[in-house]
Amino acid sequence: MGKLEGRKSVVTGGGRGIGRAIALAFAREGADVAVWDLNAANAGAVAAEVRALGRTAVAISGDVSVEAEVARGMADALAALGQIDILVNNAGIQTVSPLATMSTDMWDQMIAVNLRSVFLCTRAVLPAMMERGFGRIISTASQLVHKGAPERTHYCAAKAGIVGMTRALAYEVARSGVTVNAICPGAIDTDMVRDMPEDLRLMKLNELPIGRFGRVDEIAPAAVLLASDEGSYFLGATLNPNGGDVMV
Ligand SMILES: NC(=O)c1ccc[n+]([C@@H]2O[C@H](COP(=O)([O-])OP(=O)(O)OC[C@H]3O[C@@H](n4cnc5c(N)ncnc54)[C@H](O)[C@@H]3O)[C@@H](O)[C@H]2O)c1
C-alpha cells in the first residue's frame, strides 16, 4: 500500500521541476493526479507519466492567478477525479529587479502568480474538504522567506505571504480534518534556477553549506509526508529542505 493510496490530488505547476517530481511521487504512493500547468504540453506529458505508473491522471492547462481559469480547472479536475483530497499550490515564477527600478507590472504579476493563486486555488477546494472532514493543502513557499535575497523583494513578499496565509488558515480550519502547511525549498536544480542571472546563481552556489544545489527528488518527500496520514500532526508548519542554507 502506498502512503497516498486512493487519494485524489491537484498539483499546480506540475508540468516540470519540483511540481513534476511531486506529481510523480504522489502517483508512486498511489494517488491520482490532476497535473496543472500554464504549459499544456508539459502538463500532458507529466499526466502521461502518471498514467504509466498505473494511476488516473488529467492534464489541466490554465493560469492559476486568474479566477475564471481556476474555477474551470478545478471543475475539470473534479470531473476527472471525483473529489480533491490534496492540493499542492506549487506554480510560481521568478523575476529579478532592484526594487528602486522595479515596474509596478513586475510587482503585480509576482503577487498574482505566486500568492493570489494560492488564495484562489485553496478557496476553490476548501469547502468540500471541510465537509468531508479530510484535506491536505500544501504550498511551495521558499527559504528566501527566512533569508531574503537581493533583487527579489517581490518574490520574497509573495512567498512570505504564503507562509502567513498558511499559518492563519491552518489555525482557522484546525479542527476540520484539513491540514495546511508549506514547504520552503532551498536552491533546487530546476529551470527556474538555471535561468537565473549567472552572477546570482554562482553567489547562491558558493554560500550553500552542502556545496551543491538540491534535486527535485529531495523536495518531493516533504510533500508526500505532509499529504499522507503520517503528516496529520503538522499544522501551519514550514518544512525546510534547503541544504543547510537556513538552519531553522
Ligand atoms: N527551484 C528553486 O530553487 C526553488 C526554491 C524555492 C522555491 N521554489 C518554488 O517552487 C515552485 C516550483 O519551482 P520550480 O523550480 O519547479 O520552477 P519551474 O519554473 O521549473 O516550474 C514552475 C512551473 O509553474 C508553471 N507556472 C508558472 N506560472 C503559472 C501560472 N500562472 N499558472 C499555472 N502554472 C504556472 C510553469 O509553467 C512551470 O511549469 C515555485 O513556486 C518556486 O517559486 C523553487
Image (cartoon, grey):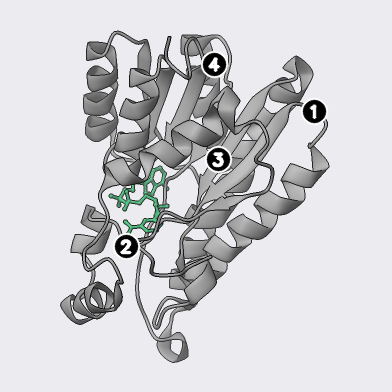
Label 2 CB less than 8 angstroms from ligand 1: yes
- Quickly name the residue at label 2: 187
Instruction: State how far apart marks 2 and 3 are (Cα).
Output: 19 Å
At which x and y percent is residue 27? 36, 20
Q: Which mark identifies residue 78? A: 4
Residue at (59% x, 23% y) in the render: 229
- Quickly name the residue at label 3: 138
Instruction: State how far apart marks 4 and 1 are (Cα).
Output: 21 Å
Instruction: State how far apart marks 3 and 1 are (Cα).
Output: 16 Å
Does label 2 or label 3 sit earlier along the sequence? Answer: 3
Q: Secondary structure at mark 2?
A: loop
Q: Residues within 10 Å of mark 1 (few under 14, many from 20)?
A: some
- Quickly name the residue at label 1: 176
Does label 4 or label 2 sit earlier along the sequence? Answer: 4
Does label 2 or label 1 sit earlier along the sequence? Answer: 1
Q: Amino acid at mark 2?
A: Ala
Left or right of 109 on screen, residue 229: right
Q: Is residue 97 above or below residue 247?
A: below
Q: Can you tell which of label 4 and label 1 is closer to the viewer?
A: 1
Q: Amino acid at mark 1?
A: Ser
